[in-house]
Amino acid sequence: MDYFLEIFLSGLTRGSIYALIALGYTMVYGIIELINFAHGEIYMIGAFTALIIASVLTTLGMSGPAVLILAGIVAVIYASAYGFTVEKIAYKPLRGASRLSPLISAIGMSIFLQNYVMLAQTSDFLPFPNLLPELPFLESTAHIMGSTDFIIIATTAVVMVALTLLIKFTRMGKAMRATAQDRNMAMLVGVNVNRVISATFIIGSALAAIGGVLIASHIGRINFYIGFIAGIKAFTAAVLGGIGSIPGAVLGGLVLGWTECFATGYVSSDYEDAFAFALLVLILILRPAGILGKASVQKV
């Protein structure tokens, strides 16, 4: 029973990370129907930024939660600035173009950011310090669920609730929903669509940075390629749950995380990705819009 619970909680932790990154995918797609394939690289840049800031603060003699807080804040700001810049440079000029053009631009931006970080840093794996504090009340269950697992799961839950409240009850959230429903009509009633799209990229990039800091602390190492792998998995989670749906992105991330961990624990780690993508294919055959997605109706 302990082994099952350990795998379940490990899948919950992994799925929470996928969910944090998938939220950025699903927000951007919900607003402008664009798959931002550079989103995984924003996650990677957030992790590298946190590593640099944590190294500087540690050299200056700081330690404890203050390092995590400051490194996390700087990583979020820096990654958000990247998200904002990428949208202005690579996507905004192509809004009126065919849907294939921004897709190719997104893939190009992903490759550019990968190589930019590889040249600026290194192609090797770098050790990442564990910035997450130990929680005393979890000492007795550390063999099943550690402090880092709890912090990752709790952070994802808080972010999902906060994001849901922002979209449902704030002025910016209402503008996002209006833009997602009909961009031209939203402009006619006074919504600043450009500001809404920029805000969407900023929020999505901030969530990716949070995920980057948490998972890098959890795993203990990073390199320039982690964004590609995490981005593909998070995109899969977003599609699995129903791209464009915030609860769907979280549910898709959790389902993907559990599938991978149970496949690793009970079958073989060699088939981890095979089971995950087989599940995706099965869900899309049975429910093409995803688990919580809504089928779009085209009027002709």
Image (cartoon, rainbow, N blue to C red):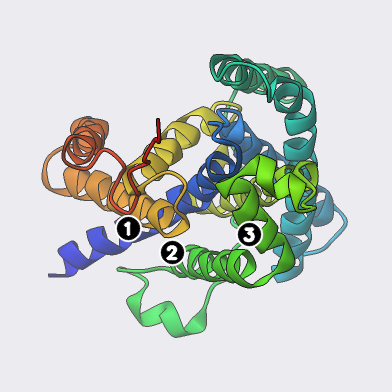
Element assignment for label 3: loop
Q: In what quadrant of the picture does the C terminus appear?
A: top left
Nearer to us in this view, 28 or 85 = 28
Name the residue carrying label 1: 10
**Left or right of 143: which side holds 125?**
right
Q: Are the residues tagged 2 and 1 within 8 Å (C-beta)? A: yes
Q: Earlier in the sequence, mark 2 or mark 1?
A: 1
Q: Earlier in the sequence, mark 3 or mark 2?
A: 3
Find residue 131 and name its label: 3
Nearer to us in this view, 52 or 90 = 90
Q: Amino acid at mark 2?
A: Asp
Badge 1 local density, few (<14 within 10 Å), some, or many (20+)? many
Badge 3 local density, few (<14 within 10 Å), some, or many (20+)? many
Element assignment for label 1: helix
Report the residue at 79% width, 24% height from top. Answer: 89
Element assignment for label 2: helix
Name the residue carrying label 2: 149
